[in-house]
Image (cartoon, rainbow, N blue to C red):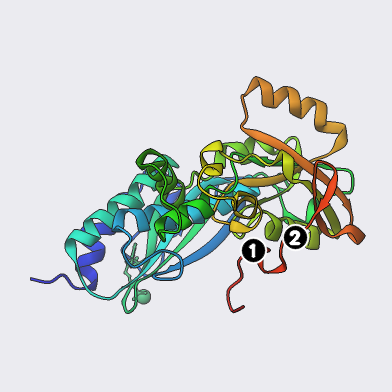
């Protein structure tokens, strides 16, 4: 017998919540939650559409982990602590093997961040997945796009360009070794949300964003929100040496490829020494890549101190443009 909507929810998504803050989870018209005392709630919603955010050939487990990781990454960028999430699922048909693998992917990532699924929506149509994440912060203790100041130091976490290289490999534009392919595959389908780092940055950093559209585009988002400019030294960008073997495009992958889900963040000059000490003590995987400058400079790049310009069509991804 083919499962109906309620069968799907019951069978694959109804799970006992683990946190006492979930007064009522899945099963009623609404979830009921008790927001941790003296905390502010932080919310974000992300949608993945088949053929747009992941290829139609993607495995259900991978689609699920990508949906979860990219959504949770927004909490990391605010320095928030993850709590709960809701899931809106639009499915073309009922395929139990697909649902089994998909729900496993959802809960594997949820468990790794101690998040409870508290509700959602299940409909029939072209494959689309929306994940709304909820987290909390101490009042005022968070990272925002609008808090960068002239003179701040600019950092990124991890490596840049992996997401774009992964997409190039998935689309057959490059043919890496099976070992590199495996690594890129996991960077694309399960990019690690930088939750721990986001919280570690709270005493040192005021502005941050997760790099989903590409370093330049996301730097521009901070620049616009803060009314500042950015000077980025591309010779300091952390790029995995494995990538440089497969294409000469690695600078544009790192600058405008997107899908890296690393954090771009600022540290003010008066905190830079204590931040450097902390990052050595805690072995933070972060790189200094430039400075915040005044708005008249825009977001500009330098290579070995000389101005570097990227073709205008490589400044990051936006929906509804071409
Ligand atoms: P309503 O019609 O009152 O909006 P639904 O029938 O859509 O309620 O959903 C019934 C319950 O199942 C609700 O608690 C809802 O949050 C939950 N739910 C529906 N779809 C999902 C899903 N994909 N994942 C988790 N919970 C879901
Ligand atoms: Mg209802």
The x, y position of residue 119, in whole percent, is: 38, 62
Considering the numbered disc 1 on the image, is that residue within a helix, a strand or a loop? Answer: loop
Tell me: 160 left or right of 306.
left
Looking at the image, residue 13 sits to the left or right of residue 237; the answer is left
**Mark 2 against mark 1, which lies toward the viewer?**
1
Q: State whether residue 162 appears in this view.
A: yes
Return the residue nearer the eye: 262 or 137. Answer: 262
Residue drawn at x 51%, y 52% as measured from the top left: 165
Q: Secondary structure at mark 2?
A: helix
Q: How many marks?
A: 2
Q: Is residue 131 above or below residue 243?
A: below
Query: How dense is the environment of label 2, judged by Cα within 10 Å: few (below 14), some, or many (20 and up)?
Result: many
The spot of residue 87 in percent (x, y) is 40, 63
Which quarter of the figure is the N terminus placed in?
Answer: bottom left
Q: Quadrant of ligand 2?
A: bottom left
Q: Residue at x 58, y 54 (%)?
A: 74
Quarter of the rendering containing residue 283: top right
x, y (%) of residue 287? 69, 36
| Viewer can see residue 15 | no
Contact between marks 2 and 1 (CB within 8 A): the answer is: yes
Relative to 225, 115 lies left or right: left
Residue 115 picture location, percent across and down: 43, 47
Residue wearing tag 2: 220
Earlier residue among tags 2 and 1: 2
The residue pinned by badge 1 equals: 316
The residue drawn where x is 34% and y is 72% is 127
CA gap, disc 2 and disc 1 = 10 Å
Camera-side residue: 162 or 52? 162
Q: In the picture, which quadrant includes the C terminus?
A: bottom right
Q: Nearer the viewer, residue 25 or 64?
A: 64
Would you place residue 81 above or below residue 25 in this image? Answer: above
Residue for point 24% across, 72% down: 5
């Amino acid at each position: 017998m083919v499962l109906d909507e309620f069968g799907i929810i019951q069978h694959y998504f109804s799970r006992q919540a683990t946190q006492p803050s979930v007064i009522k989870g899945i099963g009623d018209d609404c979830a009921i939650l008790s927001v941790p005392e003296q905390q502010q709630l932080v919310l974000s919603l992300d949608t993945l559409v088949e053929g747009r955010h992941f290829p139609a050939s993607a495995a259900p487990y991978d689609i699920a982990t990508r949906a979860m990781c990219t959504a949770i990454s927004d909490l990391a960028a605010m320095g928030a602590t993850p709590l709960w999430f809701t899931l809106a699922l639009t499915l073309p048909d009922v395929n139990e093997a697909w649902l089994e693998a998909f729900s496993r992917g959802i809960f594997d990532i949820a468990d790794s961040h101690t998040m409870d699924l508290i509700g959602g929506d299940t409909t029939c149509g072209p494959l689309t997945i929306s994940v709304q994440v909820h987290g909390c912060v101490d009042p005022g203790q968070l990272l925002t796009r609008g808090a960068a100041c002239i003179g701040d130091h600019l950092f990124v976490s991890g490596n840049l360009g992996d997401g774009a290289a992964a997409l190039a490999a998935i689309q057959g534009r490059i043919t890496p070794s099976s070992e590199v392919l495996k690594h890129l595959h996991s960077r694309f389908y399960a990019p690690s949300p930088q939750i721990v780092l986001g919280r570690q940055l709270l005493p040192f950093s005021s502005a941050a964003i997760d790099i989903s559209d590409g370093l330049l585009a996301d730097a521009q988002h901070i620049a616009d929100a803060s009314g500042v400019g950015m000077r980025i030294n591309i010779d300091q960008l952390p790029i995995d040496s494995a990538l440089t073997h497969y294409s000469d495009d690695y600078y544009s992958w790192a600058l405008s490829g997107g899908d890296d889900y690393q954090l771009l963040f600022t540290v003010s000059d008066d905190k830079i020494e204590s931040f450097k000490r902390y990052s050595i003590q805690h072995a933070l995987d972060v790189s200094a890549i430039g400075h915040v400058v005044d708005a008249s400079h825009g977001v500009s790049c330098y290579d070995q101190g000389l101005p570097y310009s990227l073709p205008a069509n490589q400044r990051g991804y936006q929906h509804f443009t071409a």
